[in-house]
Amino acid sequence: MMKSLKFISIWAISLYVSISSHAKDTIYLISSSSAYDESYIPKITQAFESKGFSVNTQYLNQQLSDFGYVNTDHERAKNLIAALKNDHVKYLWFVRGGSGALNLLPELHAEINPIKQSTPKVLIGFSDVTAIHYFINNEIGWKSIHGTTAATGKIINAPTAASTETTAAITNINDTSENQKDVVDEIFSTLQNGVHYQGLLPLNHAAKNHFEQGTLTGGNLTLVQTLFSTKYERRWQNKILLLEDISVTYKQLDRLLHQILFKQDFHPKAIVFGQFYPSKTNDGERLIYKEVIRTFAEKSQIPVYYYPYFGHGKINKPFILGGKAHIACPQDSDYCSIFQEKL
């Protein structure tokens, strides 16, 4: 009995230490793409503070541009570069995605060396943040988290925004999923423990190999495609590519995937497709998107997997971009698993 009580006490202390280990960490909020609803910032701050974090908003500098971006391209780039150079910043969490991040690449590339000299940072976000992840992973050499942006219902438990001119530009807010109630804890668990997700469905013969290994990259398909044939595109060899998007119809997706099929010198180790069907959909619509991806897989020599639990849907499982990933497919299973070591 005493041994059991001792074990429970040790377990409780370990759990407390684990939960409170980030109590003094500061999350720096930033937004480098489309405009966000400023009334959400106190809710975001409260959500993070309830987890024991401090919150710093010095990089939230919103002066709405003519295109609906947070600011002009130059001001957004200058603000992001300042955050990346700040040695006090450890966690840089993007408030929302949208569009406009790709425009910042020239100024980011001009500051590669000074950014490299600063302390490594963990950038967290997805969607339009894909362009910034790509720069950070490939040019600076830091790992980052493909995960939920801060102004979502998953973090602030907010209702869907009303359809008004003011809220039209706000980040897509989804209902909290029963399978992902605490995104903040899940992201920090990923940082501390790595990734182990089961249920990847292999869609072609090449995907049924027992083991694939590569560096994880990608994110939003539209942003990845926009990098093609530019001076900012890097080689895809030895990469496992994540792709997700819900801003395309299934016919547009079919066209985009044919572009990938026809693309020269494009040989990633594998492609993992996330959610592409709309958040509000039916089984028929969901299945037709899956069929588009399956048709692509059957024509491709690249191992292709389907895992609709990351992206713009109710579930957005975090991944470590720039980190090694392993895909294993047991012989006696219809599904595969993906693993990543802690950051």
Image (cartoon, rainbow, N blue to C red):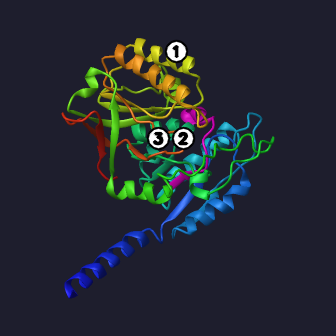
| Residue 234 included in the magenta stretch of the image | no
Give the labeled residue for mark 3. Answer: 310
Q: Cα distance, mark 1 to mark 2?
A: 22 Å
Query: Does dot 3 land on a helix, a strand or a loop?
Result: loop
- Comparing marks 1 and 2, which lies closer to the viewer? 2
Q: Is 227 left or right of 47, judged from the image as shown?
A: left
Dots 1, 2 in contact, CB < 8 A: no
Q: Quadrant of residue 44?
A: bottom right
Pick whichever of labels 1 and 2 is earlier in the sequence.
Answer: 1
Residue at 30% x, 17% y: name it: 301
Query: Whole-percent x and y of residue 194?
Result: 33, 52
Q: Cα distance, mark 3 to mark 1?
A: 22 Å
Q: Cα distance, mark 3 to mark 2?
A: 7 Å
Dots 3, 1 in contact, CB < 8 A: no
Query: Whole-percent x and y of residue 204?
Result: 31, 21
Residue at 56% x, 64% y: name it: 48
Q: In the displayed structure, would residue 167 be above or below residue 45?
A: above
Give the labeled residue for mark 2. Answer: 313
Query: Does dot 1 land on a helix, a strand or a loop?
Result: helix
| Residue 103 included in the magenta stretch of the image | yes
Residue at 29% x, 28% y: name it: 269
Q: In the displayed structure, would residue 41 be above or below residue 253?
A: below
Under mark 2, the amino acid is: Gly
Q: Nearer the viewer, residue 190 or 23?
A: 190
- Which circle marks residue 255 in the picture? 1
The furthest residue to the right: 165
* Magenta-highlighted residues: 92-106
Q: Quadrant of residue 35?
A: top right
- In which quadrant is the N terminus drawn? bottom left
Query: Does dot 2 land on a helix, a strand or a loop?
Result: loop
